[in-house]
Amino acid sequence: MSTAAEPTALQRALLRFAKVEPREASSVLAAFFLFFFVLGSYFAVRPVRETVGTILGRGYVADLWLYTAIFSIAIVPIYGWLIGKVRRSLLLPWIYGVVAIIMVIIGLYFQIDEKSQVVGSFFYIWISVLNLMLVSVFWSFLLEMFSSEQTKRLFGFVAAGGTLGALIGPLVTRLSVDAIGNSGVMFMGAAGFVGAIVCQRILLNIWNTTSAPSNEAGSAASSGAKSDKALGGNPFAGISIVLKSPYLIAIATFVVLLSAANTFLYFEQLRIVEETFTETTRRTEVFANIDFIVQSLTIITQLFLTGRIASTFGVRALLTFVPIVMILGFITLSVVNVFGVLAVVIVLRRWGEYAFIRPGREMLFSKLDTETKYKAKNFIDVPVYRAADYIGAQAKTALDAIVSSPAIVALVGAALAGLWAANGLFLGNKHDGKNEKH
């Protein structure tokens, strides 16, 4: 395709949101809609997970996080083996297909007994691992397809596709849960992942049939179909790669601190919602409302601000804004610990995470090799994150038992957010520097 060709109407429309070059348009749109279906389907069923959490109880959920961490660790060698042996053009669509099948099975069980502890526990653990796994796999492929320079220009817009799905998903759940029930929501999520399979196939076809979907300079996709070969190597390589790299250890630390802040807020959310709303469908509506507000703010930010902030101020700005806001949020909660304040803090945290932190975290991997983008990244995104969740949950439970004061818990959260901000500044400076050594 000639770079001198007149841009189409669609390409001109894309330029309103991001600096998308003509040859990048089809790839960017395919990625946009793939992420739309992945996150749209997940966020449609996410309120059901939160409702299951209130049915199981906060203490039981805290214990489940141990099993979530164990399964997150166990999935690393399995995924490492698959990515080493199976071509991405086969593996990625199959991952979405298996997810759709499991959602249907869980939906059928919910029709029999929605309050089954066994089914509820399996669903809670599975969906918690699935969330991080699917997002990690999606961005690993995009990091292989686009160059470091492209990630700053395009990842904000691509992320907006996921946010649009995450906006529509809980909205559809909120409007339909009374009529179709939680089991119907599961079936709806499964249908969404069928859409993801279609989009993934389109994106893979573009990847394998074009020499480069973007500018030639530094594009990871320039190898075309040859890039589709299985990576080979040790299934456990992701662990050793992380442990040998101070840069990757710092990214893992960032994830741990992020998880700690999220965990403190999450259990406060479960406690207050459980005390405030007695009907399970009403709880699902509340969680869906929060999701809707967060995604509404996020999509506007991703479309118009994220890429511009990254290109102008660097990744450091994306990684430090939210931790600083969280310091102020936790301090406020230490003074006024009510649902209204907590809801505002949760919205700000999640909005900032999706609009700034998530794209910024992905950009940190843009200059690394392919094996690191898949294996090491997956190790950090899934088991490290979930292990941090479990440790944070147990620490939160222990802290509540010792001090029994929400104000003190909030101040501890503020201190963790301070460490998180410092770590984000360090990583941002390393990535944005011209001569960084990873």
Image (cartoon, rainbow, N blue to C red):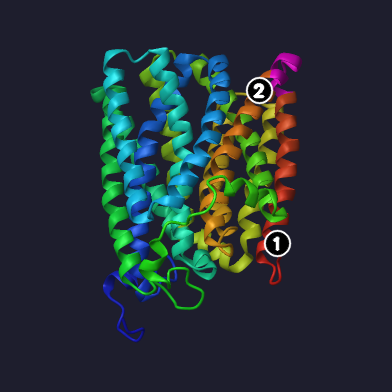
User: For this rendering, which residue is in front, 430 or 327?
Assistant: 430
Instruction: Give the residue displayed 70% in from the left and 52% down from the top.
Output: 244
Numbered mark located on residue 430 in the image:
1
User: For this rendering, which residue is in front, 72 or 15?
Assistant: 72
Q: Position of residue 324 (x, y in %)?
A: 69, 46
Residue type highlighted by circle 2: Gln
Image quadrant assignment for residue 284: top left
Residue type highlighted by circle 1: Lys
- How far apart are the two marked residues, 2 and 1, measured between alpha carbons? 32 Å
Where 164 falls versus 365 (above or below)? above
The residue most toward the bottom is 4
Instruction: Give the residue displayed 43% in from the left and 31% down from the top.
Output: 127
Where 179 falls versus 373 (above or below)? above
Q: Position of residue 119 (x, y in %)?
A: 38, 18
The residue most toward the left is 179
Instruction: Give the residue displayed 31% in from the left and 78% down from the top.
Output: 7
Residue to which mark 2 is pinned: 394
User: For this rendering, which residue is in front, 72 or 359?
Assistant: 72
What span is colored magenta in the figure?
398-407
Q: Secondary structure at mark 2?
A: helix
Q: Is residue 23 left or right of residue 267?
A: left
Quadrant including the N terminus: bottom left
Q: Is residue 223 visible?
A: yes
Magenta stretch holds residue 431: no
